[in-house]
Structures are given as C-alpha cells and as structure tokens.
Image (tube, rainbow, N blue to C red):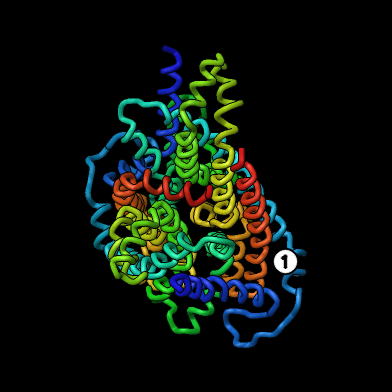
Amino acid sequence: MAGRGVHAGVIGLFTLFTAFPFYWMLITTFKSTGDLLRRGNNPFIYNEAPTLENVRVLFEDTLYGRWLWNTALVGVVVVIITLVLALPAGYALARLTGRWGEQIGIGIFLTYLVPPTLLFIPMSRLIASVGLQDSLWSLVLVYPSFTVPFCTWLLMGFFKAIPTDVEEAALIDGLSRLGAFVRVVIPISVAGILTVIIFSFTLVTQEFVYALTFISTASQYTVSVGVPTFLVRGDVYFWGSLMAGCFIASVPIAIVYNFFVDRFIAGFTVGAIK
Amino acid sequence: MMIAPAVLYILLVVGVPFFLALYYSLTDITAGSRTLDFVGLKNFRAILDSPQFLTALRNTFVFAIGSQVLVIVLATILALALMKDFPGKWFVRLLILLPWVAPMSLGSIGWLWILDSIYSVINWTLQAAGLISADNWPMYLGKPYLAMMSVIGVHVWRLLPLATVILMAGLTSIPQEIHDAAQVDGASPWRHLVQITLPLVRPIMLVASLFGLVFAFTDMIVIFVLTRGGPYDTTQVLSTLAFFTGIQGGDLAEGAAIAVFLFPMLLVVAFVFLRVARRTEVV
C-alpha cells in the first residue's frame, strides 16, 4: 500500500536525521587516525583495522574519567538539594488552593524561564566573591536554581493527582501534617520522585554556560564542558577521541531516559495545561 | 510554610543575580578592577551604536524564529507518523529521542565533525553520488549563509524530539469519539487533520513553542561549539555576544547590558503564550 510506504519513509528519514550523528560518533570512535584523515577513504567503512587507541587516549591522556566523575558527583548532590527543596514546595502548592497558590505556582514556573545567559555574569562575580571560582561547589550552589523550579512544577502535577482523603485518613489516625506527608504521600509518589531525580540529573549533565563561565581548571570540568574545550585546541581536533567521549557520555543516559519519558510527559502536560 | 525554603532559595539564586545584572548594566564594572561607578544608560547607548550588537540582535531573531517554525512543522509531521503502531516502535522512539537526551555540547561536536570542512561525510556522500565535485566542497560552517543554516539545522535537530513528544501527548489526549464522529461524517483525511486534529492540539503546540522559543533565544551551546559566532559575526547571537564581551572580554557591564536585552523578549514570549494557552483551553 502506498500509504504504508510513505509512513515508513517519513519515519525512516526522521530517524536518520536524529540518530545519524550518534551512529557517526560510534563509527569514528574505532577508526585509526590515518583512516580518518585520508580524504579518498570511504568514511563509512574501516579502511584500516578498527582500533581502541582513541578510547585509550580519551581515558589515559585526558581527564575524561575525572570529568565523568565530576559530573556524577555534582549531579547527585544537586539531586539531593533539589528533592529537599522541591518536594515540600510542590506538595504545598498542590494543596494550596486559591489565588496565592496559583500565583506562586506561576511565579515559580516563570523563574524557570529566566535563562543562565542572563544570570551568568553577576553570578560569576558572586561566585568569585565567596571564593568558589574553579570549584565544583559553585555548580552545586547554582544548578538548583533551574532544577528546583522545574521539579517543583513537575511534582505539583503529581501531587495534585493524589486524592486528599489519603492524608485526611492519616491525620485522623493521629499523624501530624508533616508526618502524613512523609509517611503517606511520599511513598505513593515514588514514580514522580524517580522522574524528578532522572530529570534533574540530566539537566545537570546538559548544563554548559555556568560550567564554562565558572570553571577554568581542567580537573574541575564537567563532561559537557571538558570535552569541547579540552579536546579542541586551536586547529587540532582529536576526532576519534572526541567522538568516543561524546558517545560514551550520551547514549547510556538516553537509554535510561527512554523508560521514564511517558511519565514525564504526563506530569509535564498536566502542569502546563492546568 | 513548606514552600518557604524553595522560594527563599530561588529569590537568592535567581532574584539577586537578576537585579545585579540590571544594576551592572548601568555601571562601568569590569572583571579586573574593583571600582564600580554608576554610569546610567551609557552601556546601552554604546551597544545600540555598535554594529556588532545590531547584527547579533537580528541573528537572534532569525535563529530563534527560523528554527522554531521548522521545529513545529517537522514535529507535527513526526508526531502524526509516530501515532500509528508499527514494528520496532520502541527502538525508533529511542533513536528519535537521542538528540534531546544527550548532552547538547557533545551532540554539537558530533555535528562539528559531520560538517567539517575537509572530512565532512555529507560532502563525501554527495560527491560519491556525483552531485558535487571534489574541488567544490561546501564549507558549511565557513560561509555566512551556510553557517546560519547549519546552526539552525542543528538546533532543530536538538529540539525536534521534545516538541514531538509534547505534541504526541496532545494527540493522545483527544478523545477517540471525536475521531469516530468525524469518520462517520465522512470527513476526508486531510479535512480531518486540518479541521479537527490540529485545532485540538493547538494549546499544547503553543506550550511546545513557548519552550522552544525561550531555548532558542537564550541557548548558546550550538553556536558556541559550531561557529563561536563566526564567520564575521554572521551567527553571533545575543547570548554568545554577552559571553564573549562579558566573560572573555572582561567587560562585565556591557556584557550584562547585552544579556539584559534578552529579558523583555522573554517576557513578551511568556506573556503571549500563557494568555493564548489559557484562552484556547476553553475550546
């Protein structure tokens, strides 16, 4: 049928567009430098034997492992800070009805729209004045500024979906408001909390502007800044190692993410439309 | 109050720098010196007189609006295509989501390699297909128009998955009865799409555009990695210009003034979309 052919063609073209760069990173990762830099060579095949040299260079001659570790470390700490701040805020906003609740909700949503590109100059000054320049702690301090609004917003959607009787029953059983929240509401919201963890973690791995502005020592870079600033020096590009670094840091996250996308979309659209 | 810690933190880490940015833009602060004098609107006059700033302002609009129009059109097509069931859908969806999930600076480097002036795989393929000759390879990032098209293309690549997924959520939320009723009334597939499906997803399309526009106005990763604003500032946008002026050039005051220019644009975008999204919700 023609309709089916068109459909498959559309899907195929889009998939090619979105996935090709990653396929290309993978191909390049195992190519020897000589093979990469000979213009006549067919770039789609291994003209010379595949090699692990690029991966070795990445892990042994650059601080790639350190950057991965830095990113993970900042990610974990920021996730914890985000949960501590956003869980109670999201819950309170979900239960606060009336004008005030709605306006604080919109206000928090709008702060998410204030971009790092507007804030990074004064922020760099503040970071320097508290002596945190060139330290991962500067990122730990600043990153919640975009994870907290976003996650509060997401969690608000999740908490709104929980019927109030559940907490009322807990209150009657003699728990305090806080006790009901910790012992009853949080356990039901595990799915929402997991989503928030994954999302704040990815927002951290994505972040570029602050990390580029605050950090200038290679050993303190995160992956997203370390790879482009350290492996591209003037005219010298270590393409094989660059592509290896990009692929290794990108694809595992994507696979984990794919499991949470539906839930995220549910929370996201509930929040955005209500 | 349970909101207090979050609100307090946001006020400190977003509010304070925000007002500092406004304040800096009215002073003569630089990275090296400790002096800080109030100079009124001098920075704004200076940047408005600078051709570099005006180019960047225009580029910001070209980049943001160009990429956003493409994103919405392509995302609508892709979302409609993905609503059907087909074998391997899980895997296809994973592949389509990749650009959005992978750290963007790394994705951009992938493109830097694909668009490379000497080793571009695109050019190699075009040449192998006999479409271009060996001594006439396009330099995607080295020619003004091609460079702008390239950064827009990569930005579209990055935002397409998010817009698609949001639109799919919108499409799924349309009750099946509406589709059935249209079928019964004998609407052609095209009329069905234009008169029923598209109007019903419009609010959520607007939400997707809001996010997309805000990203496109403010994000600098793609341009920073691919062109650094070049060639000859033809892809310089406000966010990269603010970075190069404020951080690398050390002129914090002028950098802040450039960044502050983003704010009214964001405010207008946010206001318009919140209004429109709310009004169409009633439909």
- Please state which amino acid type lies under the numbered disc 1: Ile
At 48% across and 31% down in the image, what residue appears? Answer: B175
x and y, in percent, of residue A166 in the image: 34, 57
Q: Residue furthest front?
A: A172
In the rendered image of this protein, does residue A224 appear above or below residue A254? below
Q: Quadrant of residue A111?
A: bottom right
Report the front residue among A78 and B175.
B175
Q: Is residue A210 above or below residue A7?
A: below
Disc 1: which residue: B47
Label 1 resides on the chain identified as B
Residue lying farthest top? Answer: A1
Q: Nearer the viewer, residue B265 or B275?
A: B275
Q: Residue at x 54, y 19 (%)?
A: B189
- Left or right, residue A165 beside residue B190: left
Q: Quadrant of the C terminus of chain B?
A: top right
Q: Nearer the viewer, residue A179 or A108?
A: A179
Residue A103 visible in the snapshot:
yes
- Residue A233 visible in image: no
Residue extending furthest bottom?
Answer: B35
Taking the spot 40% from the left edge, 34% from the top edge, the residue there is A15
Please give left or right for residue B11 compared with residue B172 in the image: right
Tell me the quarter of the picture where residue A184 sits: bottom left
**Residue B74 picture location, percent across and down:** 53, 34
* Residue A181 versus residue B228 in the image, above or below: below
Residue B222 spot, x, y in % from top left: 51, 52
